[in-house]
Amino acid sequence: MTGELGQLALCFALALSLVMAAAGLMGTRVEAQAVRRVATSSALGFLVFTVLAFAALTYAFVASDFSVALVAGHSHTLKPLVYKISGVWGNHEGSMLLWVLVLALYAGMVALLGRGGERLTSGALGIQGLLAAAFILFILFTSNPFLRLDPAPFEGAGLTPLLQDPGLAMHPPMLYAGYVGLSAAFSYAAAALLVGEAGWARAARPFMLIAWIALTCGIALGSWWAYYELGWGGFWGWDPVENASLMPWLIATALLHSALATEKSGAFRTWTLLLAIAGFSMSLIGTFLVRSGVLSSVHAFASDPTRGFFIMVLIALAIGGALALFAWRAPSLQGGAAFEPASRETALLLNNVFLVAACACVFAGTLYPLILDALNQTKITVGPPYYVITFAPIFFALLILVPFGPQLGWKRGDLKAAWRSLYPALGLAGIAVVAVLAIVSPRTIAATGAFAVAGWLIGASIIDMRKRKGARASAFAAALAHAGLGVTLLGVAGTTAWRSEAIAVVAAGQTMAVGPYTLRFDGVTREKGPNYIADRAHITLMDGGRPGATLQPEHRFYQAEGQDMTDTAIRTTGLRDLYLALGDERDDGRFVLRAYVSPLTPLIWIGGLLMGLGGMLSLWGRLRAPVREPAAMAQAAE
Amino acid sequence: MKPRGMKAVIAFLLMMLPALAAPPSNAPSTEAAAVAGTFSDPAMESRARNTQRQFRCLVCAGENVDESGSPFSADVRRLIREQIKAGQSDRQIEDFLVARYGDVILMRPPVQPDTWLLWLAPFLVLAMGGGVAWVVVKKASNRSV
């Protein structure tokens, strides 16, 4: 019964999103308040029915209702409750429903909290309504999660063990909050073009911030999961799925900076609009890449093109429509602010140039092999070495320029004074270089350079924070986020340059050495989990000949799915990880054991957390700020 | 920056040093020699590991031959080690594997006419963006005078 209710709720949501689109768009043209009130209330109704549809699917998963085909295909009675719930979005159909749910939440927020002019908010709701309708149609026609199975099987097929993990349970909702959050910025930008309102950047900023925070945390969470779950000790593989989340992040970061200039000094008005469109376009392309099957093989996509084709048309309409609107209306927005070459505006512009180039690099690396394969059947691989050669230098150059931005004033800055105030940061960079060269081997240019830049970034952030002493908390947002970049860089450099590794085949009682540690292998016991059987290794960390802490990496077998999984054991000091993964059993009862000592690795995610916190501080300041009337376009254009 | 802030930062840096001070050991331990095919010469072993990272496991999702546990990768690892033992150069090993499996096995895409755009695109965008930024800043500073 719940399946049918869910389906019904989704149909109501579709109807309401269409009403919202019509009323919202009409509200940009007519004076009648009633039309705009219809847009607002249909947005809330759309939210309510989407929540109901999602709740119905969640109930089917929790209750293990295997008469719903999706539940039978992706769940199992023995699964712990949390993975029954995360199973809702651990598949294509459910994750698309989650996409629409997040879209509905943003539409609700725009309706209730939107701070722009009435016409602007109305237009933004209208565009959100169009997007919602398109995605619900996509779900109903190609990816219906509520389809029944008759007869219902007694047991479900289970969920890929890889996804049965707390980190990955949280990862998709977080990432979608970011992806779809960019739809709010997109809708505001399109609405601003429709009504010709220049104050849109201010109204859209809270949504840009929420999206950026969610993307930052989502990417960090995904990379953390890859680190502890995949068992090879890496944190980022330049995999197309990872790239699909990095591209929107790069554009969203550019957008946050450019929108700041637009808001503060009226500069880059049209460029900010274009970025808002580009950011959501990247989200859509990312969704297309991950959801259409085009990544696994161009040919797999061609053999069952219904879904991919639908998304492709959807993307073409959304991006093409927005760009057409941009080409038509943007020329009338030409403001043209005045600023000196040495100014905050120039710094933000350079930030955008580098971030867009970095995004172009990821874009080319991700899509080029697909295009080449589709066009002339040539197969190439674009692996990490490509990004080391192209992405790394571009991003490195950006990081070197970062500290100048906050030191330069709006409109007219003093480059010499900025440079002088950054001397201590330069000193810190020097200290970092000396420390690395003196103490650590092997000495690599890349790692030394990374330490210098990290010292430079962190030092500059401290200088910036000291300058703002006593200011409101939100004034420290940028410094915190920039320091986070430096901290993450330290982690990346440490892991990449100085990770040591040992692989050994060990019998009970034998020891092995990795980095400064000696490990004693005490044998393996058979353990029974809720839905798996595990070989649990017991490994004692020897502390100067005496036994110390015990680590227990596992090798799990999930019966329902018939798959193997490794479960790593990580012991961290906060600055250095000891990482153990249990491999296969050999015929003679010995086991393969892999151990890594990974210095500074935790800093990768601590840095990510600092960036996220910076975003939250900024958001906090925004939400407490008094509501100001957005400047009319005519006024701003002077 | 006042001395106090500097001190805190130096203290932080010093705190980090012990984590780095441990010398990394890519050299195989005695037990590790038990893993099939490992070279006893550390330099050769580290070259083999490094070479293995340059090739892609063709039956996995984005893993290199070094980190993948698939039979395909075990095969390629064996081939690489045989070639190293036979005294082949990195270039020769690469040519050998490309002849056998095609360009797709290279983690780093080859530079050839149909990949020029791939390699140049990021820098073209950077140059174009730089050019546009130059014009924009020039116009803005003309207005501000």
Image (cartoon, rainbow, N blue to C red):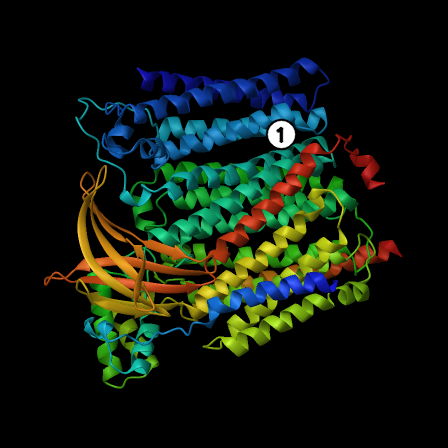
Please determine whether, in this image, residue A533 is positioned above or below residue A447: above
- Up/down of A434 relative to A9, above or below: below
Residue A301 coordinates in the image, percent (x, y): 33, 45
- Please tell me which residue is depicted at 58% across the width and 30% down the height of the picture: A127
Indicate the position of residue B56 as horizontal and vertical percent values: 32, 64
A539 sits to left or right of B91: left
Q: Label 1, on which residue? A: A124
Please tell me which residue lies in front, A373 or A7: A7
Chain identifier of the residue bearing label 1 in the image: A
Residue that lies at the very extreme toward the right in this rendered image: B145
Considering only vertical position in the picture, is A420 above or below A21?
A: below
Task: Please give the count of numbered marks on the rendered protein.
Answer: 1
Q: Residue furthest left?
A: A588
A486 relative to A201, above or below: below
Q: Position of residue A29 (x, y in %)?
A: 70, 23
Q: Nearer the viewer, residue A461 or A291?
A: A461
Residue type at the position of mark 1: Ala
> Based on the displayed image, in which of its 4 quarters is residue A44 positioned?
top right
Q: Position of residue A255 (x, y in %)?
A: 63, 47
What residue is at 43 percent from the left and 48 percent from the top? A222
Give the quarter of the figure containing the N terminus of chain A: top left
Q: Is residue A541 rendered to the left or right of residue B86? A: right
